[in-house]
Amino acid sequence: MQLKPNGIGALLARDKAPAPTASPVVPAPQNAATLLAKSFAPVRYVIPGYIAEGCSLLAGKPKIGKSWFVLDAALAVAGGNGGRMFGVQAEQGNCLYLALEDNERRLKSRIKKVLGPFEGGPERFTYATEWKRADDGGLEAIEAWIKSVPKPTLVIVDVLARFRPMAVGRNTAAYDADYQAISGLQGLASKYGVAVVIVHHLRKTAADNDPFDKVSGTLGLSGAADTILIIDRDGQGTTLYGRGRDIEEIETAVVFEKSSCRWRAMGAAHEVRQSSARKTIMEVLRGSSTAMSPTDVAAETGMKSGNVRFLLRKMVEDGTAMKADRGKYLLDVSTPLTSLSSLTNSSTGVHQHTPGPTVVSQPLPMTATNRGPSLPSAPPFPLPG
């Protein structure tokens, strides 16, 4: 006599059994007035500002720190590190972390680094280093886990290549195959109101200006996910980009702290980058014995000449720098220093201008080497940023 399967095995066997044939149910269309009369709960964030309920695809180049990012998120949701990530309080609940590129030894080492030596592992953090693929019971097993815990909140799939179906039919287009690789997880996220984060890669040779176009594969992956998160690094630093159906667009400057193995949010990328660039320009101007052109500053800093020219104009407007000659700039240190008081109007503290090109109203004091104005070693105001 054959025994009847039970437990999760029964669930998986039942899900795989052929469904009885039934007539398709066509939903009745609704009108706009009915829709506007309905009330919906606001979008729920698991990590406020960054990870929302639904299916998120997190992509980045190899070894940039994607696994550290999702591990930190999973531990924070489960109560580790005070339940905080990026300085904000995570929603607390049960987490499933599928570390499909790790073994237990490596995962243990990483958890200890993220949590620190004095914190035990949170019990609501559950993991697996092996898992069936999506078309071989993997989706059903995730659903079984969701049903088995008190508060399913976050599921991490690290990485997509180890979870998606191994092969697709000959007649399946690449776009359709990529879409199907994500759609099953997106369906579970929508059905149960949990956050699912899938780790993926960027194309190694990508040179697109739009970071969202760098995701490896076709647009089917981006089309199926609710949110796309990108960790990308360039000459100005590392940025976390985010774009989705229900979230505000994200462009946050981030830094990976090797001492704690955690990512830290620095602030809006454009503000952080501009602050850093202004500080660099100020340091170059301060160290020069003569006024400098934007081209000179760009050569010293490695920045683009157009960016330097834009920032120098802004710095003149806010009083951080001053125009000393045609197209050349100095730090604006004249107001508190009598040695350069001849450069400004004594009553207004602004430059004297004559019609035509900008000129300095009084001769500049010269150094012993006759190379230009003698500048103080430090500006009388704090450097921005």
Image (cartoon, rainbow, N blue to C red):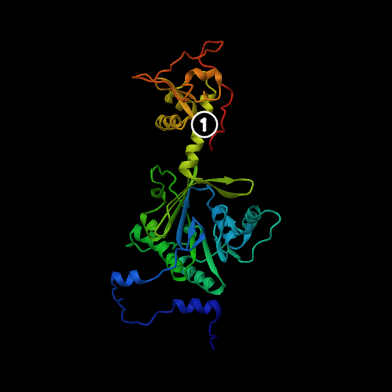
Crowding at dot 1, Cα within 10 Å, few <14 / some 14-19 / many 20+, comes out as some
The number of numbered badges drawn on the structure is: 1
Q: Quadrant of the C terminus?
A: top right
Residue 145 position within the rendered picture, expressed as x and y whole percent measured from the top left: 54, 71
Q: Is residue 235 visible?
A: no
In the foreground, 48 or 176? 48
- Residue 361 position (above or below residue 233): above
Provide the secondary structure element on which disc 1 rests.
Answer: helix
- Residue 102 position (above or below residue 281): below
| Residue underneath mark 1 | 280
Find the residue positioned furthest to the bottom.
1
Residue 156 position within the rendered picture, expressed as x and y whole percent measured from the top left: 52, 61
Relative to residue 353, is residue 255 drawn left or right?
Answer: right
Amino acid bearing label 1? Thr
Which residue does the image show at 48% across and 78% down from the upper left? 13
- Residue 46 position (above or below residue 341): below
Find the residue positioned furthest to the right.
118
In the foreground, 268 or 260? 268
Q: Is residue 117 visible?
A: yes
Which residue does the image show at 52% across and 21% down from the upper left? 288
Displayed quadrant of residue 312: top left
Residue 136 position within the rendered picture, expressed as x and y whole percent measured from the top left: 47, 69
Residue 95 position within the rendered picture, expressed as x and y whole percent measured from the top left: 56, 65
Q: Quadrant of the N terminus?
A: bottom right
